[in-house]
Image: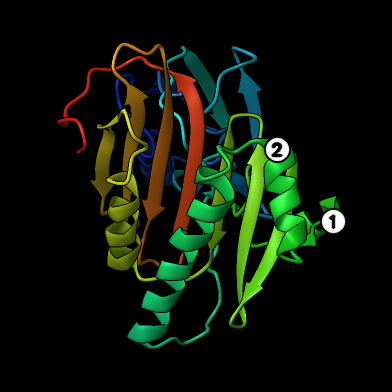
Amino acid sequence: MTQTLDVTGLKCPMPILRAKKALAQMQTDEVLTVLATDPGRRAILKPSAAKPAMFYWNRLKAKVCLPWCSNTNRPSEMQKTLLCATLLVLVACGGEELSPKQREERAQEAVKLFNESCVTLRGEPARVTAWAGAQDAQAMTEDDVKNLPFGMMELDWNAVWKLEKNQTAYYLSLAPESCSIKTEKADENMVRQQFMQLVEQAPQGMNHELRSEKSTQSPFPFRQLSYAWRESGSPEEWVLTANTSPSEQLPAQAALYFTHQIYHSKPVLNQTN
């Protein structure tokens, strides 16, 4: 039996969340075809040990997003067929107990590192690599990355470093389209507050323009906030994105992205002073 889920027009993370909900109501060996237009990042849908899943792609460049590792809203057509309804999308992250103050401190440090490594250096690989070296960051091997919490890192990462600050791990990564900082636990409201302060410090002559603001509560709370820095009339822009969640079921409660892309939307905020 085949079912079709049409999520065209919806932005990440809604396609994958609705697919997960639909799969939960299906029987093993039933087929779910998902139609979506948001490329985001490639989905990681982990089968259970008892009921392995099979995946088919109708378009080679088609992508479905995971909420904690998506930083782009570029459109492209996609159709993905999933066999087997028993798929585990979420993985619990572990049980370290933190005080509210500790979570706020981690949030502040995450945004600070994001600014220093990705934003100030414009995500340029050579400069980010040099910065990581100056910070004595640990360059992670492929095996190191595989041992990270499931879903922590983009599938197309080029380089990953682990930074230790006050006994807390922060992960700096470079991918073909982005530079990012992630940490497992951080206060969501403080991340967003610090992120907005950074956004409002747009370089001289640039606007800060809202690109995406969305949230969901099911199957877990998640919010995404994305702004662009762009000169008036420029065909290019720098996009800053904050993916946040208070949920312990995500590998990273704070994931910050800096991306260079072609301008493709209308500004909704006034120019910064």
Among the 4 quarters of the image, the one containing residue 134: bottom right
According to the image, label 1 marks what residue? 143
Amino acid identity at mark 1: Asp
Q: Eyeballing the image, is 235 above or below 268?
A: above
Q: Callout 2: helix, strand or loop?
A: helix
Label ID, residue 125:
2
Percent coordinates x, y for residue 127 in the rendering: 69, 42
Position of residue 273 measured from the top left corner of the image (x, y, whole percent): 19, 38
Viewer-nearest residue: 202 or 179: 202
Q: Residue 48's spot in the image, x, y percent?
A: 63, 53
Q: Quadrant of residue 16?
A: top left
* Cα distance in 3D space between marks 1 and 2: 21 Å
* Amino acid at the residue labelled 2: Pro
Horizontal side of 107 relative to 188 (left or right) equals right
Q: Is residue 139 left or right of residue 5?
A: right
Whether residue 17 can be seen here:
yes
Q: Is residue 28 above or below residue 191?
A: above
Q: Residue at x 63, y 54 (%)?
A: 172
Number of numbered labels in the structure image: 2
**What residue appears at the point 60 percent right and 12 percent down from the top-left corner?**
59
Q: State which tag comes first along the sequence, 1 or 2.
A: 2
Q: Is residue 265 above or below residue 269?
A: above
| Left or right: where 185 falls relative to 59 | left
**Depth order, front residue of 228/71:** 228
Q: Residue at x 27, y 65 (%)?
A: 189
Residue 102, percent from left and from top: 42, 83
Viewer-nearest of labels 1 and 2?
2
- Residue 230 is labelled as none
Whether residue 218 is visible, yes or no, is no
